[in-house]
Image (cartoon, rainbow, N blue to C red):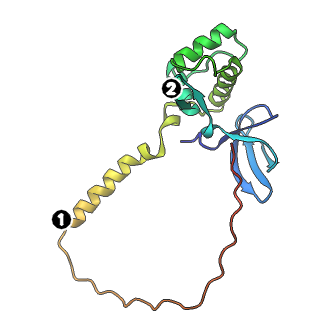
Amino acid sequence: MQLEKIISISGKPGLYKLISQLKNGFIIEDVLTKKKVSISNSSQVSLLDNIAMFTQDTEVPLFEVFENLAKNEDYKETISHKASEEDLRALMSKSLPNYDKERVYVSDIKKLAQWYNILHKAGYITPDSFVKAEEASTEDETVIADKKDAKKAAPKTDKVTAPKAKASTSSAKSAPKSTHRKMG
């Protein structure tokens, strides 16, 4: 899924793609302008993949709400985030029918519409955008399984193997521990 590395930065408009991690921050790319910049670790970053919306009985991942919205809009742009409260709530009711009206505020729905439209303009909202990596690789696994079955059916031949090397007794230096900053 190409949406997995999309982030929002508190205090900065728009959405960004996480390009890489630096010692003291991140390199990001604006999804619309493709301009790359670096930000520090002190920036408040939210990975969209970690955001969910409340329903009456559970939380639904934001990308699932985007997918529902995309299907409802036929993968086209949706209403403006500046639309009336009534229109925004109607949009939410179509995208997530059992959303919790007490805990999902109009400001959340505005952000949903705004982010969806930004992602749409940037080319991220397509039917293929929401296919999980596991689903895409299922076909590949079938091919691999077929090859394994073919190997099992093939006649066995005698193979000559080289003797195993002795294990080294010298200790290798351990790699320094990575300092990953949890986002979200």
Position of 80 relative to 129 (above/below): above
Hey, which quadrant is residue 70 in on the image? top right
Q: Which residue is mark 2?
A: 57
Quadrant that contains the C terminus: top right
The label on residue 88 is none
Q: Quick one: label 2, few (<14), some, or many (20+) residues within 10 Å? A: few
Q: Which residue is mark 1?
A: 153
Q: Which one is in front, 18 or 91?
A: 91
Residue type at mark 2 is Asp
Q: Which one is in front, 50 or 40?
A: 50
In the rendering, at what x and y percent does residue 111 appear? 69, 24
How far apart marks 1 and 2 lie (CA) works out to: 51 Å
Q: What residue is rendered at 59% in x and 15% in y?
A: 91
Residue type at mark 1 is Ala
Tag 1 secondary structure: helix
Q: Give the left or right position of residue 49, taking residue 150 as reference.
A: right
Q: Give the left or right position of residue 104, taking residue 56 as reference.
A: right
Name which of mark 1 and mark 2 comes first in the sequence: 2
